[in-house]
Amino acid sequence: MPMAVQLVLALAAAAACLVSPALTAADTVHCSNPSQDHGSDLSVMHAYGPCSPLRSTGHQVSWEDTILDLASRDESRFLYLSSLAANKKTTIPIGSGQQIAASASTYIVRANFGTPPQPLLVAMDTSNDAAWIPCSQCVGCPSTTAFMPSKSTTYKPVPCGAPQCSQVPNPSCSPAPDSTCGFNLTYGGSSLDALLTQDTLSLAADSVPGYTFGCLRQVTGNSVPPQGLIGLGRGPLSLLSQTRSLYASTFSYCLPSFRSVNFSGSLRLGPVGQPKRIKTTPLLASPRRSSLYYVEMTGIRVGRTPVPIPPGALAFNPATGAGTIFDSGTMFTRLVAPVYTALRDTFRRRVKGTVSSLGGFDTCYEGAVSLPTITLEFTGMNVTLPVDNVMIHSASRNVSCLAMAAAPENVNAVLNVIASMQQQNHRVLFDVPGSRLGVAREPCTIA
């Protein structure tokens, strides 16, 4: 049986500012070195946390700006996910254009490409498939760290006639004698041009020879993950599909809270070590976008009060792409307007206090208030979210906001997205062969 890969998260909090005022010169953030890869452990961290290697050290961001930036990035990503549900055209989410939120995905993992291995910090994304990374001599790539094909003895371009060439968006073929496969796609405000290539991918102690990925040749725009992306979706070029014999298309993660600078959680690849006792709900598939992790959400409760959701508002419809997905790259849960409005109104009736707003968050309270849990109900599984998964807090301003929002008004939204904040301190299992998704409470924050 293949060894499961335990990816130990050394996550710095993307929103550490959620519980503190803007950082000043007097504030000290004690960042420990990321845990080194050993055995079957691989370090993972938040892409824009205060201790992330990708974070700009000279850019101080206030609490309010952090909230607005994250909400803006989420709105852009929601538009992207809605486009995936609505049609088969492959596009990539628009970043907010601001430094803290320019990337499309929340978490990064250290992966090694080539022989000898060259390390990169790639974004991991449950709603994307193909991997692509910046390569040497790339024009316009945002990172100075790039993969150098000339230094790898196992690197090779994919020929035009290979089956992988038909699995990428907008494939192209270079003239003879090279006859190599390339592809291009749009990534929000950016355009990407890549050569389709193969090389060894190493994750901790495991190696995957001949892994297919895009080697970026040219990028225009500034909304791409600095060191590339690796997809955890269900498509033919995803990590799960390309490592089916090693990891059996199974993985789980536990995302720690991002309210502090020192956290640890895990991303576990393969069936070994997965929880035996875990409530699950069936995974559903949409022919419009088979890689998305659809589930059937049947209701919501605020405390013990059922939310009066309009009939059909939560229904899964494979023909239109409507329904509910779990997504690692969205920060705050987004619900279609009728569902969110019903949830918000029920929440406001339950919580006694004056309601204010902050950016895209329309249900905020000042001072101490009694806050209820929220239970998300799925077929065969209920997930009760404690207050830490429901509210964002500012200790300095003494403000708490409901950490969910409605779908943007400028899109015909049919998709509900269960986001990373609502998944924190839970083990989320993706069992593709068993066609099930499981959630169990698991505190994975280390003080």
Image (cartoon, rainbow, N blue to C red):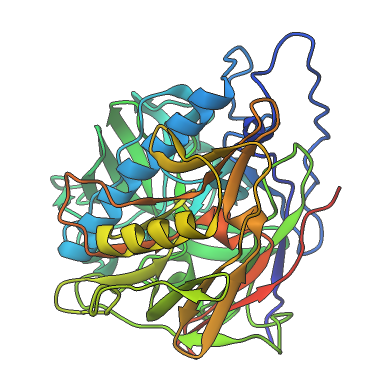
Whether residue 318 is visible to the viewer of this picture, yes or no, is yes
* Residue depicted at 25% across the width and 46% down the height: 408
Residue at 56 percent of width and 47 percent of height: 107
Q: Residue furthest right?
A: 447
Of the pair 83 and 310, the residue shown nearer to us: 310
- Up the image or down, 379 lies above or below 384; here it is below
Instruction: Please give left or right for residue 107 compared with residue 361 in the image.
Output: right
- Residue 135 percent location from the top left of the image: 43, 35
Q: Is residue 391 left or right of residue 71?
A: right
Q: Image check: 49 left or right of 148? A: right
Q: Residue at x 30, y 45 (%)?
A: 195
- Asked which quadrant contains residue 248, the reply is bottom right
Question: Total of numbered circles in the picture?
Answer: 0
Q: Where is residue 305 in the image (x, y as percent from the top left)?
A: 50, 74
Query: Residue 345: x, y in percent?
Result: 39, 57
Front residue (pair 435, 182): 435
Question: Does residue 174 appear left or right of residue 138 in this picture?
Answer: left
In the rendering, at what x and y percent does residue 153 appear? 54, 48
Residue at point 48%, 86% (across, down): 281
Q: Based on the displayed image, in which of its 4 quarters is residue 319 positioned?
A: bottom left
* Above-or-below relation of 54 to 325: above
21 shown above or below 146: above
Q: Quadrant location of the N terminus?
A: bottom right
